[in-house]
Amino acid sequence: MRAKILEEDINILELNKNVNEKLKENNINKIKELCSMTKADLRNISFEQNDINNIEIHLQLNGLDIKKRRY
């Protein structure tokens, strides 16, 4: 199941609209692309710490995390 979710569009994470748009502007469209990033990567594309925390929470609710960790 988790392998399948990695292929899904980031829209299913129901992130904040601005966060979602910024990810797409940076060609991050799939969950697997987001999961391969680090916090530093996200900061480098101008995400605030609050946005990064929000991304982590939404990934963790789906049993995932940034840097490809799975729960």
Image: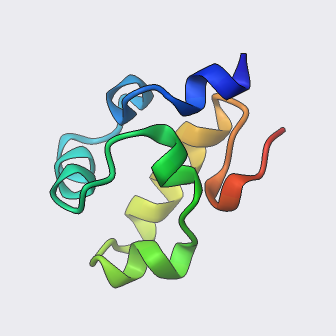
Quadrant location of the N terminus in the rendered image? top right
Q: Residue at x 25, y 45 (%)?
A: 20
In the image: residue 66, left or right of residue 25:
right
- Residue 18: horizontal and vertical position, in percent? 18, 50
* Residue 15: x %, y % from top left: 35, 38
Nearer to the camera, 49 or 7: 7
- Quadrant for residue 27, please give it: bottom left
* Left or right of residue 59: residue 50: left
Residue nearest the observer in this picture, 14 or 7: 7
On the rendered image, what quadrant is the C terminus found in?
A: top right
Q: On the image, which quarter does residue 61 sit in? A: top right
Give the tally of numbered discs.
0
- Residue extending furthest right? 71
Residue occupying the point 43% across, 30% down: 13
Residue 44 lies, with reference to residue 70, above or below; the image says below
Q: Which residue, as the protein is rendered here, is positioned at the far top? A: 1
Residue at x 33% of width, y 52% of height: 28
Q: Percent position (x, y) of residue 31?
A: 48, 40
What residue is at 70 percent from the left and 53 percent from the top? 68
